[in-house]
Image (cartoon, grey):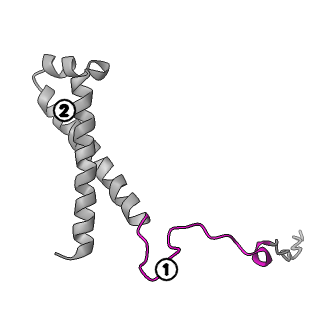
Amino acid sequence: MQTLPRFLIRHALIGFALAILLVGLALIFDLLGLRGLAAASRSGPVAIGVLAFSLGLTFASVQMGMAVMLLGRADDPDSGKARPIPTEQARPIPATLRNRRRTR
């Protein structure tokens, strides 16, 4: 498998694992009565599964996006670091405006 798909799949799995961990902790500590609500309902396991999947999808997307944004190029040693703007480029440039009067 190529390195980029493997990289993305690895980070997607990290995001799903974090979501599963969060849902598990919410159930263990009965956050907002979630465990009791799921136990009292016939469709509780389905609701927990949907919650875990939707959080997993969100966390995986965020994890993949962060990983891609933090990638550095091998040929650029300062990749990922903020570069100061040179002072000659930081000066404001005056804009020229034309006066367009409407005649009635």
Q: Which type of secondary structure does the marked residue at label 1 adopt?
A: loop
Please state the horizontal and vertical placement of residue 89, each as a whole percent of the image: 76, 77
- Residue 10 falls in image quadrant: bottom left
Q: Position of residue 34 (x, y in %)?
A: 25, 22
Q: Is residue 22 above or below residue 73?
A: above
Frontmost of labels 1 and 2 is 1
Q: Secondary structure at mark 2?
A: helix
**Local crowd size for mark 2, using a 10 Å CA cut-off: few (<14), some (14–19), many (≥20):** some
Q: Tell me which amino acid carries mark 1.
A: Asp
Task: Decide: is 68 above or below 14.
Answer: below
Q: Quadrant of the C terminus?
A: bottom right
Number of numbered discs? 2
Give how far across and how far down residue 92 sits, in percent: 82, 71
Q: Nearer the viewer, residue 32 or 88?
A: 88
What's the mark number on residue 48?
2
Residue at 23% from the left image edge and 70% from the top image edge? 5
Chief secondary structure of the magenta span? loop
In which image quadrant can residue 88 be found? bottom right
**Magenta region: which residues?**
70-90
* C-alpha separation, residue under disc 1 versus residue under disc 2: 45 Å
Pick whichever of labels 1 and 2 is earlier in the sequence.
2
User: Mark 2 and mark 1 in contact (Cβ < 8 Å)?
Assistant: no
x then y, percent, for residue 66: 40, 58
Which is nearer the eye, 97 or 52? 52
Disc 1: which residue: 76
Q: Badge 1 local density, few (<14 within 10 Å), some, or many (20+)?
A: few
Which residue type carries mark 2? Ile
Disc number placed over residue 27 in the picture, else none: none
Taking the spot 89% from the left edge, 74% from the top edge, the residue there is 99
